[in-house]
Image (spheres, rainbow, N blue to C red):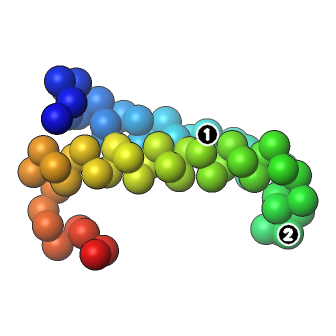
Amino acid sequence: MSKRIVELFLFDIYVAILKIEKTIESFNTPEELAKSFIHWDSVIREFEIIGEATKHLLNANFLEDKYRVF
């Protein structure tokens, strides 16, 4: 278990969402984004960060189990 303050994982999610929004704002379609490998990879990485932070929140019982997909 991480010794990090659990609420900081919420901040990680928030920052990741802001980065995704900033990255995709210059694209008109998902296809345009997919053709830009650097931007696509950065968006995927931010989703990975969201997933990891969510996992930590669930493991710390910060979120209810009903938010689990699996």
Is the N terminus in the top left, top right, bottom left or bottom right quadrant? Answer: top left
> In terms of sequence position, does the residue under pointer 2 or pointer 1 come before the other?
1
Q: Left or right: where does residue 24 sit relative to residue 46? A: right
Q: Position of residue 68 (x, y in %)?
A: 25, 69
Residue drawn at the location 12% of the way across and 62% of the way down: 64
Residue drawn at the location 31% of the way across and 51% of the way down: 54
Type of residue at label 2? Glu
Element carrying mark 2: helix
Badge 1: how crowded within 10 Å, few (<14), some, or many (20+)?
some
- 3 or 32: which is nearer to us? 3
Decide if residue 28 is in sight here.
Answer: no
Residue drawn at the location 81% of the way across and 43% of the way down: 38
Q: Which residue is mark 1?
A: 19
Reply above or below: 24 against 70.
Answer: above
Marks 2 and 1, how far apart at CA: 19 Å
Q: Left or right: where does residue 33 sit relative to residue 58? A: right
In the rendering, which numbered label is found on residue 34? none
Q: Position of residue 17 (x, y in %)?
A: 52, 46
Badge 2: how crowded within 10 Å, few (<14), some, or many (20+)?
few
Number of callouts: 2
In the rendering, which numbered label is found on residue 31? 2
Q: Left or right: where does residue 55 sit relative to residue 17? A: left
Reply above or below: 28 against 16.
Answer: below
